[in-house]
Image (cartoon, helix red, strand yellow):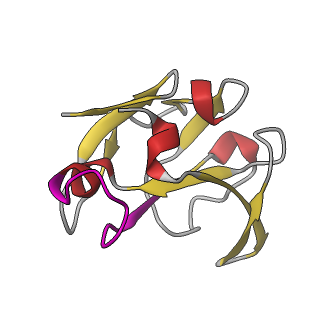
Amino acid sequence: MRLTELDPWFLRIVDPGTWRHVDTLAEAQGVCFVCPKCFTTLGNTIVGAHRVICWSRSRGVPDDEKPGPGRWTLEGTGMADLTLGCEPGKSRSVLLISGCAWHGFVTAGEVTLS
């Protein structure tokens, strides 16, 4: 499925624990999108699905910012071609360790389920 189907937002931290939506990847320190596993389970709707937040250490997000511990590089020009790349010492995959336990990748705007 495409990331653009999952109501994605770019995020920037204002203060520790507080963030706001931003319009462009250039401004972003993270990305938030509807969980692809729950989206599929609910019949391809965002209604009732939780969200996933992925922060980027290389864009200035500290390791103690929640959620964690994962951190990704944000690569591409926007949502249509976004790749969550590998920060040093981290995995490129996204793994939710609670709730629905989605595990997958965001590559060139495509979201995969493991």
Q: Considering depth in this image, is 110 or 73 the residue closer to the camera? A: 110
Residue displayed at 29% across by 37% down = 104
Which quadrant does the C terminus fall into? top left
Residue 7 left/right relative to 61: left
Residue displayed at 45% across by 61% down = 68
User: Visible in this render: residue 92?
Assistant: no
Residue 53 left/right relative to 58: left
| 108 w.r.t. 84: above or below | above
Which quadrant does the N terminus fall into? top left
Residue displayed at 71% across by 50% down = 29
Q: Does the magenta stretch include residue 50?
A: yes
Q: In which quarter of the image is residue 18?
A: bottom right
* x then y, percent, for residue 32: 54, 56
User: Visible in this render: residue 110?
Assistant: yes
* x then y, percent, for residue 63: 57, 59
| 8 w.r.t. 109: above or below | below
| 49 w.r.t. 58: above or below | below
Residue displayed at 16% across by 55% down = 41
* Residue range (magenta): 41-52
* x then y, percent, for residue 13: 74, 66
Q: Quadrant of residue 49?
A: bottom left
